[in-house]
Amino acid sequence: MSKVVLITGGSSGIGKSVGEYLSQKGFTVYGTSRSPERYPDSMFSLVKLDVADSDSINEAVKTVLAKSGRLDVLINNAGAGITGPIEEIPDAEIKRNFETNFFGPIRVIKAVLPQMRVQNSGLIINVTSIAGYMGLPYRGVYSASKGALELITEAFRMEIKAFNIHMTNVAPGDFATNIAAGRYHAPILENSPYKKQYADTLKLMDSHVSSGKDPQLMADAIYKVITITHPKIHYKVGEFMQKFSIALKRILPDKVYERMLMNHYKL
């Protein structure tokens, strides 16, 4: 019997690549979108789900269970980018980003856990970010939301271990997706003291995404996580230097690491 997989944010980018790959591997895949009708050519089923709406999440899970009778794997992939000087990002946008990147995944986890407990099995994969391992200039809110998801996963997995449910993080680096177009950009203000630094950093960040890795690498990594018996707590997928930067943060003095980041961003 093929495993049933639910992928939030399955209509584009990493979620779409993962869904298509798992479908080809014989999994029964359901992706989610706030507007699934916009994607009639999807290779796998799309159900309506908004991670900011608990009723929407519960209905989506009910739909999957009504069609397939079980749910084996949840991939919390839906996420949103955000850039800007923290001082100048409106509070409402900071809260909105955490709603999508942190509270949203928690809501979906809570919705699927009762079914996984009944099954006495399940796997939850939270797609975080290498940016969640460090506070990055002009990406501080994004780093914080993804870092929070990394940490809560560590606690969550210990709480659910008794039910034979596994949870893990997969942290991507920069991938060639449409995240740059969809993220919130604080405007570059003419009278802002951050104007030049932010504008230059924004160009650098966008170039990283444009030249990023193929999302198929994430599909390969997630497939491997699903097919092993005891997944690790953390996985990182991306350029060698992006992954190596996490190791450097552990061993370098804080100020040395900070200077390294500032040199990279030419600050």
Image (spheres, rainbow, N blue to C red):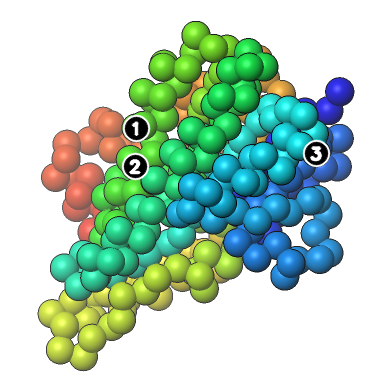
Q: Quarter-wise, where is residue 87 in the image?
A: bottom left
Which image quarter is the N terminus in? Answer: top right
The label nearer to you, 3 versus 1, is 3
Q: Which residue is mark 2?
A: 147
User: Disc 2 to disc 1, how far (Cα)?
Assistant: 6 Å
Mark 1 lies on residue: 151
Residue 46 in sight:
yes
Q: Is residue 73 above or below residue 166?
A: below
Going from N to C along the chain, the mark reached first, 2 or 3, is: 3
> What whole-number distance in Å separates the C-alpha atoms at marks 2 and 3?
34 Å
Task: Please state the horizontal and vertical placement of residue 233, each as a whole percent of the image.
Answer: 47, 24
Which corner quadrant of the image does residue 263 belong to? bottom left
Residue 61 locus on image (x, y percent): 64, 40
Residue under label 3: 67
Judging from the image, what secondary structure is the residue with disc 3 in? helix
Q: Position of residue 59 (x, y in %)?
A: 62, 46
The reply to whether dot 2 and dot 3 touch (C-beta < 8 Å) is no
Q: What amino acid type should be assigned to the residue bearing mark 3?
A: Lys
